[in-house]
Image: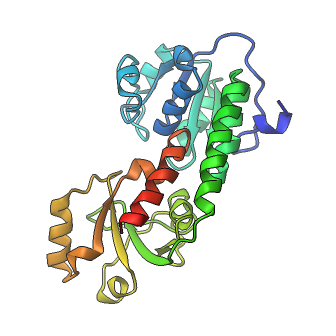
Amino acid sequence: MQLDTLTDAIGVRHEPVTAPARIVSLVPSITELLFVLKLGDQLVGRTHYCVHPPHLVAKLPSVGGTKKVRYARLQALQPTHVIVNVDENPRELAERLMADGYKVIVTHPLTPEDNVPLYRLIGGIFNRTAEAEALAGRFERTLAELRQAVWPQRRVLYLIWRKPWMGISRETYISKMLGLVGWETLPVESEARYPKLEITPTLLGSVDLVLFSSEPYRFVPEDLETFARDYDCPLEKLRLIDGEMSSWYGSRAIQGLQYLQQLVREY
């Protein structure tokens, strides 16, 4: 394992463990990845948003949410390592954990291709190199298959929240995932990674599809009907999308690539 594969998103190099670890994962998609890498027996804590695999995470104690962690509960688990993410967990929390002496692994995949270094980072630190390489191979084969196809270009509005309406910038992992299948997200430019949006006739007229994600806000079919009525938008232009498949990195990204290919073919 080359040393640079053990460097996390903020440039901290981590040493491979020499004894079984006690891991708390504050990132739902990475909790799932840890199980896939056969590290479930070293996982001692999670957030209540860590829901996969259901039958295994249910046995683990929760330390709260991704934004509001019950710190005393986390401390009681006596972790050797805590895994966080730049977008999902507050910086102040990561800094507090570091100040208290925990080994904090910071992740921040920005593109689908970043999954391979992520697998190698986690696998390298926790002595699961073979499992990480096998997963990287699966991801790379799935991505190569996707890239062999020619995808029609469409402009899409991807909504993650209502009251206020919020979308995604082109700098996000989600946008890069959608771009692999020819879906260009709006707005074209945004200072915020997850900007508040004003829904206007001009905006709706400039997109081919409006995608309503299942997370963080869980849109349901009734939301699409209300949106169509409130904004005089054709219902056939509105679609639900599985947010886990479009936004979760880690092992689920492989399923996500397959899901998006099928979704585009249906639309």
Can the viewer see residue 19 in this picture? yes
Write down the quadrant of residue 129 in the picture: top right
Answer with the quarter of the image where residue 48 lies. top left
Report the colour scheme.
rainbow
**Front residue of 42 and 24:** 42
The quarter in which the C terminus is drawn is bottom left
Q: Position of residue 42 (x, y in %)?
A: 56, 15
Please report the residue visible at 62 percent of the width from the left and 44 percent of the height from the top. Answer: 139
Tell me: residue 150, above or below residue 130. below
Residue 118, position as x, y percentages in the image: 66, 40
Position of 93 relative to 191 (above/below): above
- Percent x, y for residue 260? 46, 58
Q: Which quadrant would residue 150 be assigned to in this image?
A: bottom right
- On screen, residue 149 versus residue 103, left or right, reads left
Residue found at x 57% / y 47%: 86
Q: What residue is shown at x 24% (from left), y 75% (from top)?
A: 236
Q: Is residue 227 left or right of residue 57?
A: left
* Residue at screen point 19% across, 63% down: 223
| Residue at the limit of the structure toward the right, as seen here | 2
Count of all numbered marks drawn on residues in the image: 0
165 versus 200 height, above or below? above
Q: Is residue 259 left or right of residue 103?
A: left
Residue 46 placement (x, y as % from top left): 45, 27
Which quadrant does the N terminus fall into?
A: top right
Nearer to us in this view, 158 or 93: 158
Say whether residue 110 is visible. no
